[in-house]
Every structure is written in C-alpha cells, then in structure tokens.
Amino acid sequence: MAMIRLLVSCQPSRFTVLVFVTAIALLVVFETSRYLHTKTNHSLSYIGRVDAPRRAMSTQRDSSQKPNILFLLVDDLGYNDVGYHAKKGGSAIRTPAIDELAEQGVKLENYYVQPLCSPTRSQLMTGRYQIHMGIQHYLFEHARPHCLPLDEVTLPTKLKEAGYSTHAIGKWHLGFCHKACLPTSRGFDTFFGLYTGGGDHWYYNRSMEGHREFSGHDLHDDTAKELRNVRQYDGIYSAELFTSRAQEIIKTRQEDQPFFLYLAYKNVHFPLQAPERYKNLYRDSINNAAYRQTYAGMVSAVDESVRNLTKTLWEEGVWDNTIIIFSSDNGGSLNTFGNNWPLRGGKAFLNEGGVRAVGFVSSPLLPKAVRGTINTQLIHVSDWLPTLVRSVAGGQTNGTKPLDGYDVWQTISQGAVSPRTEILHNIDPMFDYAEITHEDQALLDSLPGDQRFDPGFRAAIRVGDWKLLTGSSGCPFWRRPPESPDLIPIQSCPGSSSNAIQLYNIRYDPRETCNVARDHKELVLKLLQRLQFYQSGAVPANFPATDSRANPLLHGGLWMPYLD
C-alpha cells in the first residue's frame, strides 16, 4: 500500500499508470488468493484440511509409495476424558486437536483393549491374546525377570521386513531383564523412552511399588548397537520431550523409506504432574478437585502434543501419506481421577470402563466416504498387527505364531462388516478365586453337561453383543466426573451385581447395569464353553518372584537389563 500511495503522489505518465495498474492487479490477486485460502482452511489452522490441494510437488504421493504409520498410545486415558466423549459425559476436559483429527477420520466406538498397560502393549506388538504368551496375570514389573516372550514375532519386525524404518518413543513396559527384551532387539531401529511403566514426568526416576529401595533413573536413547541412559533431558516434561523426539524423527527421515513411529505417551499415568499452563486451563471449570485439575492438564498436554505432531507432518510434506492411529491403553484409573462415565469401572477391571478404548484412525488416505464417520464394528487391539502389516504396509504375517487378531482395514476404510465376532478379554487363573453364591450354583446346576469353565476364576468374554464375566471380574460402581456431581447416579438392577456369573447385552446395556444370566441360560452355557475352549489352549501364567539383581543400586542407579 505504501508503494501505491507513492505512485499516486507523483506526476502521472504512461509508465506510472502502467505500474499503478499492474500493482493494483497484483494486490487484488494476492488478497483474493489469501481470502480463498483462509476460507478453505479456517477450521484447521495447524494441519490443513485432509482434502486440501497439495501445497507442493514434494507432498504428492506416488501410488507405489507405502504410507507412513504414526501410532499414538495414551496411558490410562479415561473413556470420558477425550473431548468428543466428554461433551456428553459431564467432563470439563477439552481436546480440540484430538477431536479435530478424529472428526477427519473414523472414530472406533466398539474398540477394545486390555484392562492393564502391559497386556495391551503385548497384544498390540504380537497380535496374540495374552493367554497364549503366559502373561495373563498382572503386568511386567521392573524387578520380575520376564518380558514379552522372545519367540514372539513383533509388529515392528514385520514392518521392517516390509521396508519400513521403525522407531519407538515413550513407555515400553514389556520387560527389560535381558538385552534381548529391549525395543531395539524386538524390531525397532531406535528407542527413546522408559523401560519401566512409569515414574516422574520431569526427572524420570522410578521406584518399584512394594520395594521402595529399588529406585533408579529410567530414560534411554537406544539403537541396535548402543544402549544409553541419558540425564541431559531431566527437567523437560515427558509429553513435550517425547513429542520433540518424534518431530525430530519425522524431520530427519529418509524420504525414500516409509516410517513406523510408535509414540507411547506416559501421560496420564500416575504421578499426576503437569505444567501450570495446562492446569490453568481448568482453573474455573474444575475448581472442586485439585488432582482432577492436574489430570485434566495432563490430557491437555497430550492434546497440544498431537497438534504439534500433525503440524510437523504437514510442514514436512508427509501429511498426505501418513496414517494416524490413536488409542488409549486401558480405561482411566479410578485411583488417579481418570473418568470413564457412563461406563462401569475403570483400569484393572474387565468391565467396559476398563476395556472399552478411545480410538480412531485419521488420514487423507481414507476414502472421503468414511471420513467423519463413527464405526461400531467390533475391533480389538490385537487386530493392529495383521491390519497394518498386510493391508497398510503390503507385507506378510508369515512366520508369526497363530494370530488372534484380524485384518480389519476393510472394516475401517470401507465400512465393511468386521471379521471379528468375539473377544477374549482375559482369563486369569492366578487372581483371587471368587465365592460361588447359592444363586450362582443354582444357575450352574440348571445347565446341561459338565465340560465348561469354572466361574470362580476371573475371566471375561464377548461374543456378538453378549458379554460374560466370571469370578472377581467386576467393579461395583460407576464414577461421575468430580466436576459434575449433579449427574444422576447409575445403579444396578436389583440383585444383579454380586454374582460370580454376570451376563450383559453390551449393545443395549453398555453400562452393564442388568445381569441377565438367569434369563439366558443357554447363552451362559455357550460362553462358559468358549471360555473353556480358550483355557484349554492357554499356556501357564508366568509371574516370577522379584529378583534382587534388578536393584538399580547394582547398576549405577539405573534401570537396566540385569540378567546378561
């Protein structure tokens, strides 16, 4: 505009007029272009619309180029703690970046994981139920000498065979007693993160529950050739640190090779810690529970991390050729202010609040017809290995042990019926045996035959719309978000919750309020027989005693492999 004012102040000439007209024309073109660009992209200031024209030739995808895969796993995220669920569930937590990414993709609203972190991670990495690996009881504790069985073929291994570079960031929690158990020995080219299951979000120190003297530093920067414990990042918040490393990997990638980036956040796992700027977002909306406010801040830290990651994908020209999978690893922990309302229970329970996950797939590679849709087909975390290896990477699952997972890419990308019709949530023979009540025994006595599962053991199975829980599997309550104490409480149907045999129709009763086992005896028998089928093929649970050789004091104050 300054140039135009200068021109009009001069004595006019043919040259001056020509320059003036040219300047006006260029200004009109520029402003029109800027207006149209703003109008097109107003809702996505940081990642652009997935159907927007490609900005440069470098972002155009060759039809033969395999897509990049970004898998985001969030620790202990409650079902009601992501914005697009929270709006209906009385939660004050807002996740605009996650919500927008989900809105552009396919929300998985019948998607299941395991009730604890290690079991979910093990099934993600192998495509196999935990009963087939001997890890059906609890999780991988730091000083117990076991890990993901070394004869299991992993997801990153198969993706490497398909031509991918493979990188893991964040929480491993699949054992580290031997060097062969570590991520860089299980298919990942690089690993940056924690071997254990948690610890301080700023200083990466971890003590073992029940053995407080077992305390050490746990942040590692590994390759297949070198294992390094690193302390120079102490004082940087974990969500921001892990996101920064992920951005670095994206920026320094080999452009002729697709990448698989597995980013397993430690948020929102205990201890509850968040920078003040995130907690302050909830100063007014959550003012009756300080810990819940911190928890909400931890969720917002993940949301900002997702925003920054998607921005990097766009800026680096790989947004158009990347598939993003977002998943929680189990239900929100009721002990640390996670919220799964209106689902029953939470982390560690086999009720819906413990196993129904927050999940979606987002990518410009999805057909436009399915973007912005909700998928209610049955999908399980074990399905990711065959889905990503076969349909996304174009690889083969030859050489794996028999898979429990299914290739569900047609279900996600085309809306096809899921090939999965049942889920074994778990069978844990080491959990406390439940009392068989008179009502339970009367039900058992009315069933024909005796080739069935012992309902005193903790187990759960889903077949179609029906879910059977046995033993000490259930949680007796539903927890409202603390910021919404006026929500009407959910209660069980009379006499339906204290039994060792519980049957629910999840389609019509997703809150698991009415145990209808007495009304559907044939179904109870069928599901007990399915549990017996799985139990007959299970390997013994491996849960060894604590090994004092794991004590970090013996390893320079570090959590490191201790049996080599």
Image (tube, helix red, strand yellow):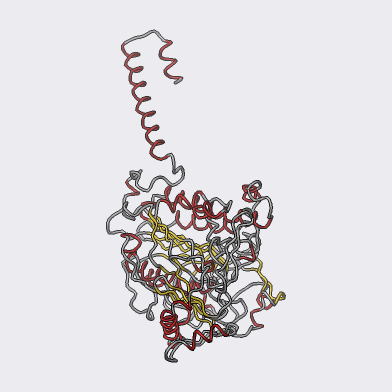
Task: Determine the image quadrant of residue 290.
Answer: bottom right
The quarter of the rendered structure image containing the C terminus is bottom right
96 lies above or below 231:
above
Q: How many numbered discs, if any? A: 0
**Furthest residue toward bottom:** 450
Q: Is 475 or 292 nearer to us in this picture?
A: 475
**Furthest residue toward top:** 11
**Furthest residue toward right:** 213
Residue 246 is situated, as x and y percent measured from the top left of the image, at 49, 58
Residue 194 is situated, as x and y percent measured from the top left of the image, at 57, 68
Task: Determine the image quadrant of residue 107.
Answer: bottom left
Which residue is located at x 34 percent, y 48 percent? 58
Which residue is located at x 53 percent, y 82 percent? 428
520 lies above or below 94:
below
Q: In the drawing, does residue 142 fall left or right of residue 38?
A: right
Q: In the drawing, does residue 40 fall left or right of residue 229?
A: left
494 lies above or below 454:
above
Q: In the drawing, does residue 265 fall left or right of residue 519?
A: right
The quarter of the rendered structure image containing the N terminus is top left
Residue 520 is situated, as x and y percent measured from the top left of the image, at 43, 77
Q: Is 120 or 68 nearer to us in this picture?
A: 120
Q: Is 121 or 159 nearer to us in this picture?
A: 121
Which residue is located at x 36 percent, y 32 percent? 33
Residue 60 is situated, as x and y percent measured from the top left of the image, at 32, 50
